[in-house]
Image (spheres, coloured by chain):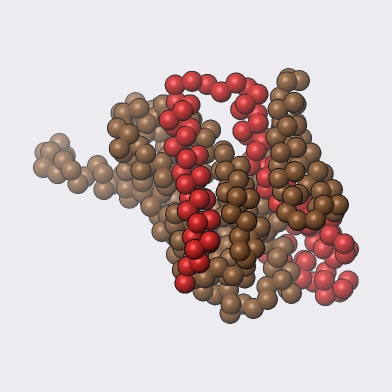
Chain colours: A red, B brown
């Protein structure tokens, strides 16, 4: 049921995540980060998320490109559930009609 | 009368009512988390994770953004180092969250603070910190209510495991989700997460650098290098841009 390599990946993910959870408390509780370090830390999660989905922004068919544009617009004004619904439905319809 | 009642139940009253208060406060947030958990579970099963592996990941790691990133990059066999590195980068914000919470945890011994931090998520952190600030304004000691925080965190924890597992079990029933545009759920979730981190265009300039570099790398370099190239160039941009303030 559990592949050894999958288990290793999951245990590594869990260890790394727990280190980030206690690291800030243990290391930074008695000092302050430099503004530059704070800026890098604050930018990091967004940089990773946008990099992971970057291929969606350079898709090679118009349906998917319009789909991501609609999803981006939805994300600026709606919460999680409506945004996911709008993104999925718009992309499904666009693929059906534009091919 | 009230004072006598409190004295007669010194253990049960405050802790139980604080736990309940935390559980009640997290209910509206839970409505937003359930669909997100179902989508993650369904996508994980599409990528080949078993119904046992999904709760293992979501229960041990318990950090949704990094789990979405990992599943998006998941291959069989998985790129272990890539996924660990991406998990660190996505969750690096925990370092700042833990540092912000640290002054409120001074009254707690490490044997209580360290396990409590295992269940720290964006949601339980935000609720716990907001509650501590409100209690401080009312002069309550200690400002940070551990049972309140645990009340929120425990509900999030078990809901997250339950609904990601349910999503994994339902995934095969849904069939090939890509055919209907369901693959757009991932970018949608990521974009909503980023909207939550949005602090104005100036602060978001590194994201734009990441997007452009990652997209170009994806077009011209085979493999999963686009993630690392995009993330690292964004961090360098954040480092360089921070100097011009």
Figure check: A22 above or below B69: above
Residue B163 on image: x %, y % = 49, 65
Locate the N terminus of chain B and report the quarter of the image it occupies.
top left
Residue A86 coordinates in the image, percent (x, y): 72, 63
Q: Residue placed at 79% from the left, 39% from the top? A: B209
* Residue B18 seen from this side: yes
Residue at horizontal 11%, vertical 42%? B8
The tally of labels here is 0
Observer-nearest residue: B100 or B4?
B100
Left/right of residue B233 with respect to residue B106 in the rendered view: right
Query: Residue B84, percent across and down?
Result: 57, 49
Residue occupying image coordinates x 65% and y 31%: A40
Note whether A55 is above or below B138 in the view shown: below
- The quarter holding residue B85 reads top right
Question: Residue at (87%, 62%) from the top-left corner?
Answer: A60
Q: Which residue is nearer to you in this view: A90 or B164?
A: B164
Residue B141: % across, % down? 30, 28
Task: Inspect this view and state whether residue A73 appears.
Answer: no
Q: Nearer the viewer, residue B17 or A68?
A: A68
Quadrant of the drawing holding the C terminus of chain B: top right
The residue nearer to you, when weighing B204 against A45, is: A45
Is residue A59 found left or right of B170 in the rendered image?
right
């Amino acid at each position: 049921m559990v592949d050894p390599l999958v288990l290793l990946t999951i245990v590594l993910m869990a260890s790394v995540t727990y280190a980030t959870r206690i690291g800030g408390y243990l290391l930074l509780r008695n000092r302050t980060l430099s503004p530059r370090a704070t800026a890098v830390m604050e930018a990091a999660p967004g940089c990773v998320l946008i990099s992971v989905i970057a291929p969606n922004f350079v898709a090679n068919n118009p349906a998917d490109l319009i789909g991501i544009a609609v999803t981006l617009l939805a994300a600026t004004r709606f919460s999680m559930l409506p945004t996911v619904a709008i993104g999925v439905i718009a992309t499904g319809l666009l693929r059906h009609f534009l091919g | 009368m009230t004072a006598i009642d409190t004295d007669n139940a010194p253990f049960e009253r405050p802790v139980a009512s604080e736990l309940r208060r935390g559980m009640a406060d997290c209910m509206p947030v839970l409505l937003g988390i359930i669909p997100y958990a179902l989508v993650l579970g369904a996508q994980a099963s599409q990528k080949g994770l078993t119904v046992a592996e999904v709760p293992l990941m979501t229960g041990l790691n318990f950090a949704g953004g990094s789990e979405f990133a990992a599943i998006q990059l998941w291959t069989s066999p998985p790129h272990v180092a890539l996924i660990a590195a991406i998990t660190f980068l996505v969750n690096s914000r925990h370092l700042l969250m833990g540092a912000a919470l640290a002054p409120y945890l001074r009254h707690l011994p490490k044997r209580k603070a360290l396990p409590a931090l295992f269940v720290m998520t964006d949601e339980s952190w935000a609720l716990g910190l907001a509650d501590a600030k409100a209690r401080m304004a009312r002069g309550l000691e200690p400002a940070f209510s551990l049972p309140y925080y645990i009340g929120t965190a425990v509900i999030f924890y078990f809901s997250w495991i339950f609904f990601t597992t349910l999503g994994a079990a339902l995934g095969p029933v849904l069939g090939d989700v890509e055919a209907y545009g369901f693959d757009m759920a991932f970018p949608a979730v990521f974009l909503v997460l980023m909207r939550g981190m949005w602090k104005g265009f100036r602060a978001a300039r590194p994201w734009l650098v990441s997007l452009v570099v990652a997209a170009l790398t994806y077009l011209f370099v085979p493999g999963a290098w686009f993630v690392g190239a995009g993330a690292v160039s964004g961090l360098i941009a954040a480092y360089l841009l921070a100097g011009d303030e």
